[in-house]
Amino acid sequence: MNPLATWKIRAIAAGLFVSLPCHANDAAAVDGPNVRCMKHEDGSRAVFTRSPDSRTLTKKTFTPNGTLCMVTTYKMDSNANPLGCKIRDGQNNEMFKVSYGYHKVTGLLVEELMFDSRVRRLNPANGKELPVQRIVYLYDAEGKRSAPIVFNLLPGKTFEQVFGVKSSALESNPFK
C-alpha cells in the first residue's frame, strides 16, 4: 500500500486532524497551510482556519447537511494556547465569550469561564460580570488532563445539551 495512503488511514483512525481538501459549503474553505478540516462520525464537519501570524484561529462547524451552525473565534498567545474566544451561531449572532486560565508554573489549562454575550449578569456584591458556566481541569502526576468538571451556573439547558460538547476548549492544536 502507498505510504501516504497508509498515513492518511492511520491519522483518520486515530481521530487526528488531517490536511485534506475540504468540501464544506463555505467559499472560504480552501485547502492550504492555514486550513484544516475535520469530519465527524455524525457527518458534521469543522473547518479550522488560522491567521498567518497564528494569533487567531476560527472554527466553523457545519451540520451533516452542510449548514453553518456555529463559528468560534479563538485569540491565541505566542505558544498557540487560546486566551479567549467568542462563539457565534450560524447567523453570526454572538452568543458566548470565553476566557481561559492557565497554571502560572506549568502553563496547563486549569479553568474556562463562559459568559453569556446576550445578557450581562453582574455579581451584586462586587459588580463584576458572572459567568454562566465554569469548567475546571485537573491533571494527574503524568500531566494528563481530566475530563472537564463543568459547573453550570444557570438553570436550563447546558452548553453540552445545546452544542453536543462539554467545552469550547481545543482538544489539540489542529495545526501541530
Image (cartoon, rainbow, N blue to C red):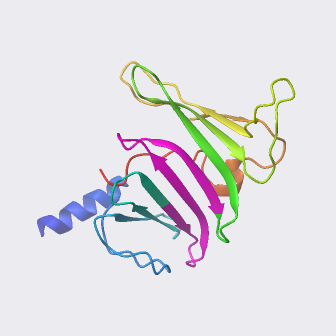
Which is more toward the observer, 42 or 55?
55
Query: Where does the magenta region start and end?
Result: 59-88
Where is 98 relative to 49, above or below?
Answer: above
Q: How many marks?
A: 0
Tell whether position 79 is magenta.
yes
Where is 172 relative to 61, above or below?
Answer: above
Q: Is residue 96 shown left or right of residue 172?
A: right
Where is 18 relative to 144, above or below?
Answer: below
Tell whether position 154 is magenta.
no
Q: Split into 4 quadrants, where in the image is the N terminus?
A: bottom left
Which is more toward the observer, 94 or 158?
94
- Residue furthest out toward the right: 124
Which is more toward the observer, 165 or 102?
102
Residue 76 position, x and y percent, is 44, 46
Residue 2 position, x and y percent, is 12, 70
Quadrant assignment, res 6: bottom left
Residue name at image x 44 percent, y 54 percent:
56
Residue 132 position, x and y percent, is 74, 40
Residue name at image x 81 percent, y 49 percent:
119
- Residue furthest out toward the left: 2
Quadrant assignment, res 121: top right
Q: Is residue 75 shown left or right of residue 17?
A: right
Q: Is residue 3 shown left or right of residue 66?
A: left
Q: Main secondary structure of the magenta part?
A: strand
Residue name at image x 78 percent, y 54 percent:
118
Which is more toward the observer, 162 or 25?
25
Residue name at image x 37 percent, y 76 percent:
30
